Amino acid sequence: MKTIISLYFIVMMVGSAIAQPTVCPCTPATLLAHQERSGAKHDSNYSQYIHKKDTMTVNYIYAWQQKYTAQTNQIKTDPNNAASKRKHGTPEDTLYTLKGYMWFIKQEDDCDFHIEIGPKDAAGTRIVVEVAPENKALQNKIKQELDSRHLHIKGCTASSSTDTHFKQGIPVVVTGLGFYDASHKPNTNHGDAHTKLYSWELHPVKDVVFGK
């Protein structure tokens, strides 16, 4: 009887271990309160925003760069500056639903998942969407999906960009808040060659639904 009970507890412990979150371990290089535009990037009260339920593509986001130049020029990155808050009258007021293809993920030094979403064509221009570390459930969901496809996250399960850029895009539907990353000016250092043209993102991301 004792043997049976012991085996039962071993099975339960193994099952519990398997069910535990598999999010990549990470300690932010900069405390959340000191991160640029921290309040805007880590806002998770999605119910206070308009939800544009019509699904859009990355082409829709491209137009934001020029359309909102005057407003985004006023944004400051210092989290203690009132001008670092979400900019009213821009896409930062809205929760969007984006349909596209996931091509690459890396875990950044602030522990966000930095994700490239673009068209089906691998050579197409992409935009960045980011999952904040507070959304552990979503980070875990993404990692488990990639594990099941034998794909990697740079800075977590692989270190090389060559090994972490997907050969085929994964169809996804992403829900997240519009966000202007004023830390990265257009056509400079916003990600890699696929994403540097635009500073607009969806950040933070509320959910990602994977297709086949």
Image (cartoon, helix red, strand yellow):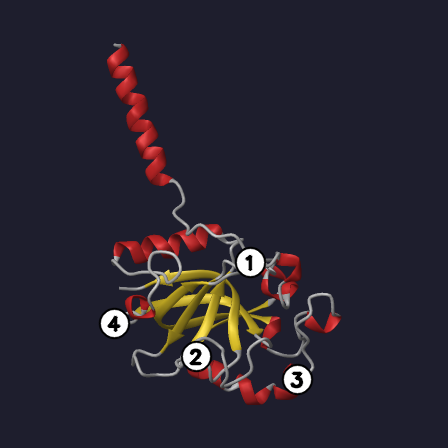
- Disc 4 to disc 3: CB gap under 8 Å: no
Disc with the residue nearer the chain's start (3 vs 2): 3
Image quadrant occupied by the C terminus: bottom left
Q: Which mark is residue 73?
A: 3
Where residue 67 sits, quadrant-wise, is bottom right
What is the distance, in whole Å, between disc 3 and disc 2 at their CAs? 20 Å
Q: Is residue 55 visible?
A: no
Q: Which mark is residue 167?
A: 4
What is the distance, in whole Å, between disc 2 and disc 4 at their CAs? 17 Å
Question: In the depicted view, which residue is nearer to us: 60 or 18?
Answer: 18
What is the distance, in whole Å, between disc 2 and disc 1 at their CAs? 23 Å
Above/below status of 87 relative to 152 = below
Disc with the residue nearer the chain's start (4 vs 3): 3
The residue that mark 2 highlights is 195
Tag 3: residue type? Asn
Q: Residue at x 49, y 77 (%)?
A: 190
Tag 1: residue type? Ala
Q: Residue at x 58, y 58 (%)?
A: 44
Where residue 209 sits, quadrant-wise, is bottom left
SS of the residue at dot 1?
loop
Question: In the depicted view, which residue is nearer to us: 18 or 173?
Answer: 18
Tag 4: residue type? Lys
Tag 2: residue type? Thr
